Image (cartoon, rainbow, N blue to C red):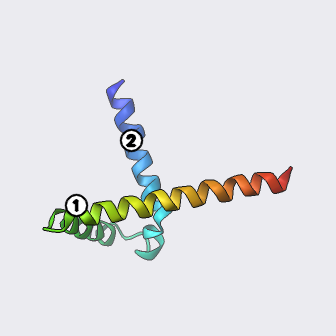
Amino acid sequence: MARRARTRHLIELGGLVQKSGLVELADDDRATLYGAMLDLAGRAADAEGAATLALWKRRGKRAFGAEAEASTDAAAVKD
């Protein structure tokens, strides 16, 4: 069961990388994507890491909310 949960978690993370647009921006180059993620990890680990993480969290929540709202609006238009 733990293996299945881990697999699901990894798939969800991959979906977030795709959703963020990084795959297209990096032309699907794994070295570029990995380098970008290493840079993000470095920023999160520096002296202002807590503020950086809080900013990213706010942006992510805002984006999820906008996506959910757009999905709801699109469903309402279809009805």
Circle on res. 50: 1
- Near-viewer residue (3 or 74): 74
Q: Residues within 10 Å of mark 2 (few under 14, many from 20)?
A: few
Residue type, mark 2 in image: His
Q: Is residue 27 left or right of residue 35?
A: right
In the rendered structure, the answer to whether residue 14 lies left or right of residue 64 reads left
Please report contact status of discs 1 and 2: CB closer than 8 Å, yes or no.
no
Q: Residue furthest right?
A: 79
Quarter assignment of residue 4:
top left
Along the line of sight, the residue nearer the viewer: 11 or 31? 11
- Residue 29, how many percent across, how many down? 37, 70
Residue appearing at x 68%, y 55% in the figure: 71
Q: Quadrant of the N terminus?
A: top left
Question: Front-most of 1 and 50?
Answer: 50
Which mark is on residue 69? none
- Residue 70 lies, in percent from the top left, at 67, 59
- Mark 1 secondary-structure assignment: helix
In percent of width and height, residue 2 lies at: 32, 27
Q: Would you call the spot at circle 1 few (<14 residues within 10 Å), some (14-19), or many (20 or more)?
A: few
Q: Element at badge 2?
A: helix
Judge depth for marks 1 and 2 and give the one in front: 1
Q: Amino acid at mark 1?
A: Ala
Extreme residue toward the left, this view: 47
Q: Residue at x 31, y 72 (%)?
A: 32
Which residue shows up at 84% across the image and 53% down it? 78
Which residue has dot 2 on it? Answer: 9
- Residue 51 location, x and y as percent? 25, 65
Residue at image x 37%, y 45%? 10
Residue 41 in sight in this render:
no
